[in-house]
Amino acid sequence: MTAIRVQGLRKSYPKLQVLKGVDFEVAEGGIFALLGSNGAGKTTTVRILATLLKPDEGTVTVNGFDVTSQAGKVRESISLTGQFAAVDEILTGRENLVMIAKLRRVADPRRVADDLLARFGLAEAGGRPVGTYSGGMRRRLDIAMSLIGDPPIIFLDEPTTGLDPEARLEVWAEIQKLADSGTTVLLTTQYLDEAEKLASRIAILHEGTIIVEGTLAELRELLPPAKVEYVERQPTLEEIFLSIIGSDQKGQR
């Protein structure tokens, strides 16, 4: 089953064409990574998928609903976590979760909050103000808040921006748990190791278009076979990315 389908997506601003005909599909379950440099159009794409922006052209469906004509149904199907944790630092972790559960009219908000605190390893910190949390703890709380109501699809827009290496590993573990539980995750990132570690499929967005898409193994096949020196070495996703972008830029000269 297809969770997300994007065809011919275009979006422009008065002096800038951001998306120039984006096409991709995301199957239910697993992690789909939208990889690209700053300004490639990743966040614009996510904002359209989440009904926060209207496309200029193209067809976009999320969980089978059109983002333009059925925006309400799309919002019921998704949750969005942006680049910065959307938590209230004055409230405790538990109070943040209870507040969101009440806004989403979930039954028994306190039980839901306690279950999520335990799931994300925040039970002991649940009674503390979020202002005392580390960056990794805030991000884990932010992701926990996005799960309230059990949305089948979650958008994570550069979720590890600004985190230290240890906090990034904590967030990676939680993202993998989401996918393992059957949630469809669309992850945007500019960190190549993040996509390489987590994604079951990867699309590279460059200058407003998808220039390649596939599994990591399929992307590796785009480069020459691994060189045999002392041991066989497979190209990293970073090498694949830079090689493809470099070839694309040469072709435009």
Image (tube, helix red, strand yellow):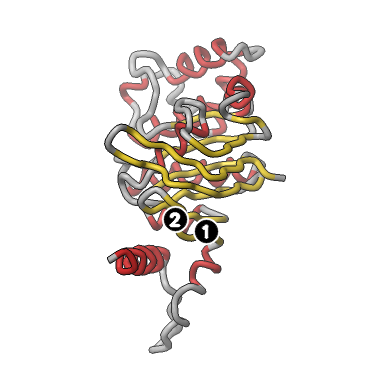
The residue at which mark 1 appears reads as: 213
Label 1's element? strand
Label 2's element? strand
User: Which quadrant is the N terminus positioned in?
Assistant: top right
Residue 83, horizontal then vertical, whole percent: 37, 35
User: Which quadrant is the C terminus positioned in?
Assistant: bottom left
Q: Which mark is residue 204?
A: 2
**Which numbered disc flags the more N-terminal residue, 1 or 2?**
2
Disc 1 versus disc 2: distance between alpha carbons? 6 Å
Find out whether the residues at labels 1 and 2 contact each other: C-beta distance under 8 Å.
yes
For image coordinates 65% across by 45% down, the residue present is 29
Residue 227, horizontal then vertical, whole percent: 41, 85
17 shown above or below 236: above
Residue furthest to the bottom in view is 229
- Position of residue 214 in the picture relative to residue 205 (left or right): right
115 shown above or below 11: above
Residue 159, horizontal then vertical, whole percent: 41, 39
Residue 97, horizontal then vertical, whole percent: 50, 19
